[in-house]
Image (cartoon, coloured by chain):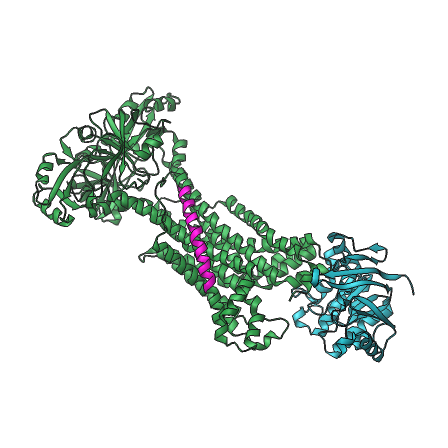
Amino acid sequence: MSEPAARIRDLVRTYGSGDALVRALDGVSLDLGAGEFTAIMGPSGSGKSTLMHCAAALDRADSGTVHLGDEEITRLGDRALTRLRRDRIGFVFQSYNLIPTLNAEENIRLPQAIAGRKPDPRWYDEVIDTVGLRDRLNHRPHQLSGGQQQRVAVARALVGRPRIVFADEPTGNLDSRSGAEILELLRRSVDDHDQTVVMVTHDPVAAAYTDRVVFLSDGRVVDELRDPDREQVIARMAAAEPADRVR
Amino acid sequence: MIRATWKSLLARRVRLFMSTFAIALGVAFVVGSLVFSAALSSGFTRLFGSSVGDVVVRPQGSATLNGDPSTRTVPQSLVASLARVPGAARADGNVQAIGVFVVGKNHKVVGGLGAPTYGISYSDAPAGHGIPGLTLLYGHAPHGPHQVVLDEKTAQEGGYFIGEKVPIVTATHRAVLTKRLVGLAGYADNTSLAGATLTIFDVRTAQKLFLKGKHAFTNIWVTAQPGVSQTQLRNDVSRVLPPKVRATTGDDAADENASQVLRGVKFLRTFLLIFAAVALVVGAYLIVNTFSILVAQRSRELALLRAIGASRRQISRSVLLEAFVLGMFGATVGLGLGMGLAYGIRWLIGLVGLDLGSQSLVLDTQAVVAGYVTGVAVTMVAAWLPARRTGRIMPVQALGDVVALPESSIRWRFALGLALTAAGVAATLEGLFGSLPHSGYWVGGGILAVLLGVTAAAPILCRPLLALARRGYALVFRAVGNLAGQNALRNPRRTTATASALMIGLALACTMSIIGASAKASVDDTIEKNFIGSYVVGSSFGQPFSAQVATRIGRVPGVSEVVRQRYAFIEAGGKRTAVTGVAPRQLSTFGLDLQHGSADLTGRTVLVNQRYAADHHLSVGDSVVLGKLPVGHRTFTVTGTYANTPLVFDFVTSIANLRSAGFADSDNFLIVFTQPDAGDLLRSLEKTVADLPVVTVQDEHQFAEQQRAPIDQLVLMVDALLGLALVIAVLGIVNTLALSIIERTREIGLLRAIGLGRGQLRLMVTLESIVMAVLGAVLGVALGVCFGVAMMYAVKDQGLEVIAVPWTQLVVFLGLAVVIGVLAAVLPARRAARLDVLTAISAS
């Protein structure tokens, strides 16, 4: 495996205080390989979303470090974090991914436009063709189906050639066919363009598209799986689930 | 359901505050205007109530306290016979005159803004209904020719203490008097004199000063015995009166006096009430807007309530109940703010010279009721539309991701708006140029209809403007500009409703500045075209001054001629009009353009303005009856007509005729001609009248300035009040922005997540705010120019012939709108920038 795209060390994130103190992340250490498609899985409350938020510079950890490439991001100020998100990270959320007032093309170009840049036209064309939205570029989000909206979001995340794309339950709101399209899209960006993709999901079918699945429970990495298939994932999920929750 | 309403109210403190604020502001303006104008009129009414006796006996046709200085009197001997009338407790004669000025220690005349300046004789007679009349507060009553008593406020303002010498200027023969101040008086219930001044002499001195020493009175008060009504006493008194003397009940006399003065301040009340209406309309916009947004935000919660079984009516009622609670709360806060506002207005008006200092401002029942009714009614009406819409929310929508409120057709609104605008334009034009009665109502109603119509049509009307703004923004500010422009376009109804508040305020401000600028330009134009002579002599308050002034000025070396003018306000054919009195041999200096007949003013003759003559079917040789003369009415022969001119009134007659008609021997205006080589005489002319502080000498430039001053004052006052309307508009923008940011929390979170910086976010919100402000300003200025020009056209033939549009000022208004936009965005933008990215994204 090559140099990791992100290195997470001893990450701790707590919420609340006193009796209500919750350790969402309890010392997580993890390397996210460059050019890999990684899934982070775990039951509700396992800390998988918190991990992604901290790694993606959306949330601040209490202690520990996150390196994106050479850069340590946990101590950066708002301005630097904003630039980091804009230039080096791509996001796909579960829902509400697009700005409703902008058409598909404007949404895709938005991060670059905010930065005052134009995307590389060849790469832009390639992304548009990959997501298959050329005939929908002038449509506003409300004129697009959920799957199409999510493809626009993927295109937006890819078009800036970020170091990592973070996807938070990207198929959570989609029917299985649209979901499969999105996962194919992410898979292809990894295979064809060496894009690093990290996806939080609780869907074993989605996890089966990835190269590696990391299992979290109670704020710790409890297990991992390489080149998973659906059955393996289900089996490991059951194992990772704390005993009292299964019953 | 009621519990749910309460909870939802309390859960949204920020929004609660915002909408309450909008209501409170609207109510505050209504209450403030009402309280202030009530104080204004009650001040005058009470003043006049305590300045008339039970029955007032006076010469037929003369006004009591307030008419022009009259030489007509009742004989002193009448007092004794009136005192013997059955039912009369006592009778007291009074001498009253106006145009008696006290000169303060700062050499300035005390009082101002046209409030009357009375000179009266001292009397301890009670006023009507046993109210104490004039009461000595300090010192003693005036005795003999060298003593005077002043009202407390005048003495205070002039800087005089008891025992000091006070210079007094009168319009009569002896111009300047110096008297020793021996006492301070006032009306017992300590009501404000509302800017009026009282100078009090003993009876004999007053008779010498104002009645040429005759043993007579201008009126007699007859006081009723207990149990005798004013009407009864008046009837008894009437029986013993000599011919041409009339008795009036005190109540009637007070009303008559009060209404005469009130007419002078009526414009102020009318203006304040118009302003309150405007404030309310603007406030209503804010409330409608706020409620629409609030309901839209709650639609999911409401849909959930529907899903668990709440009926359509319960939902609507819940929203209306919320509106009722907010309305009550807002109105209560508004009452307090309104009182503050009334104090503010009083202070503002005090700056312009109308002192209502001791007049207490009372929150009476009328104001309280009006405040609550407007606050609650407007809020509930404003909430009614959104409430009706919430009733149509389908329960299933609670489950959906995005809940869209069913919106009524925007096209239907557009059509309605256009129709309303057209009707408003028609009504305005009818009022301005048509012949129906009550033209003022037509114009006012028309303008209001146009404002409402444009507001209704605005969402569609303004689309091109908003689209243009978006393109401009995108060009200059790139992505952030595009986002801001799109946001303004996203809900054009909301954007334009917010802009409308500013539009209304600015439309009125522009109308006023066009009227002001045109009036000033017309004054300048008139003066430039018609100024004759080298200097003019007038008096600060338009009061007449001693005829001796002209004689003295005529003796100044270098002066070749002094032309006297006298004004008398009279009636002809039952309508008020005015006559200019001139010396017949000086008539030619006016350069009147004689149309028919001759300029012969010998005998009982008048010249008539040709236009007036045409309107009233008068021609040379006809007889015309002029009424409301001190002697009643007299018949004059028309000897000529002249072309319309601002130099003289509709009638011109000789000074001798005015004198024989009973008018005092004093001039109103002098035109001074100088010898060709005389040089600058201003200094020496001023020295000649230096002992007469009310009399001023001016050259053309100074005269023009003085003529413009009242217009400036009016415009200033109007602007100050409209400034407050702009404040509401700004708050409206703040409100809309803040609410729409709450509404767009997730979107803002997303933008921040994909890399929008805090500064860029602030810029975006500011740009949105500027769009709304500039849109309002553009519409407002455009409408204001239309209103202003239309109004000036309508009064074109009444001496205001120049239509001036103050372009610089209008550009300043537009610039101001940008500033307003920036300021309004400060807080909402900060709020938006402070949103935590993660919380914002996960907000529901």
> Which image quarter: residue A220?
bottom right
Residue farthest top in this picture: B557
Q: Residue at x 47, y 54 (%)?
A: B25
Chain B colour in the picture: green
- Pick the residue in front: A151 or B754: B754
Rendered position, B397 above or below B470: below
Mark count: 0
From the viewer's side, name the closer residue of B528 and A35: A35
Image-based side of B491 in relation to B182, left or right: right
- Taking B578 as reference, is B531 left or right? right
Residue B382, how many percent across, how many down? 47, 64
Residue A124 among those drawn in magenta:
no
Q: At 54% across and 63% down in the image, what residue appears?
A: B10
Name the side, left or right, on which B209 lies relative to B683: left
Corner quadrant of residue B136: top left
Q: Which portion, as a residue range, is magenta?
A: B324-349
Nearest the eye: A147 or B84 = B84
Name the residue at 85% across, 78% down: A232
Q: Is residue B344 magenta?
A: yes
Quarter holding the C terminus of chain B is bottom right
- Position of residue B199 relative to residue B253, above or below, is above
- Chain in cyan, by letter, is A
Residue placed farthest to the right in the image?
A: A1
Name the residue at the front extreme: A19
Q: Position of residue B712 (x, y in %)?
A: 42, 40
